[in-house]
Image: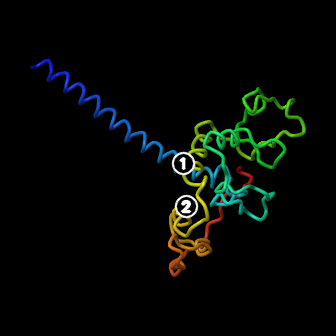
Amino acid sequence: MLGGGMKYAKRASLAALFLFGAVGWASADEASIERGRTIFDGKGACSFCHGWAGDGQGDPRSEGGAPSLRASALNRDQVREIVQCGRLGTAMPYFDRFAYTDDRCYGMTAADAGAEMPTRSFTTLQAHEIDAVADYVAAKVLGAGDVTFEQCVEFFGKVVEACGNYPTASGEKPDMSKAEPTPQSGAPTDAH
């Protein structure tokens, strides 16, 4: 009997460890998503071209033509590769400082890419930062449909003037009586 009880206790401990581990992973995922949002709008300046909502409505000073990620059929791994390596023949830069120094990007070096070589971003990102951006885009942007007031408030962390451009999820006009000015989002600077 005692031996059976010990086996049960060990199994229960392993099950608890597994469950708490799973909760820890969920928290890590949420933390990565939030880090990715911060990088998307800040250090990576993704919102400068893609817009804060990833809808392709970036800053008018951007090169323009950034696709809406909200309507994209890409998956998380494809987003990660594009952030790391850029898009050949487009304005999408690469963020991996070592991209095209070997064949890590599309199996190509800079010599292979030739005139189609993407430009290097104003700033480069570490692998864990690229992962976080991909986590954020996959969780909050890909397939998100039309932008809503609630998504705007979630992104900025408060009601800002830009949020008044979007309907609520129920289709009602949002209450903008306490709106604050919209902070400038993701504009590249000399620091980038």
On screen, residue 82 versus residue 158, left or right, reads right
Which amino acid does the dot numbered 1 rest on? Arg
Q: Position of residue 97 (x, y in %)?
A: 72, 36
Q: How is the image coloured?
A: rainbow
The N terminus appears in which quarter of the rendering? top left
On screen, residue 122 versus residue 38, left or right, reads right
**Residue at point 52% right, 51% down?**
34
Return the mark for residue 155: 2
Which amino acid does the dot numbered 2 rest on? Phe
Q: Residue lying furthest bottom in this view?
A: 177
Return the mark for residue 35: 1
Quarter of the image for residue 182 reads: bottom right
Quarter of the image for residue 41 reads: bottom right
On screen, residue 128 versus residue 20, left or right, reads right
Crowding at label 2, few (<14), some or many (≥20) Cα neighbours within 10 Å? Answer: some
Disc 1 on helix, strand or loop? helix
N-terminal-most mark, 1 or 2: 1
Q: Position of residue 170 (x, y in %)?
A: 50, 73
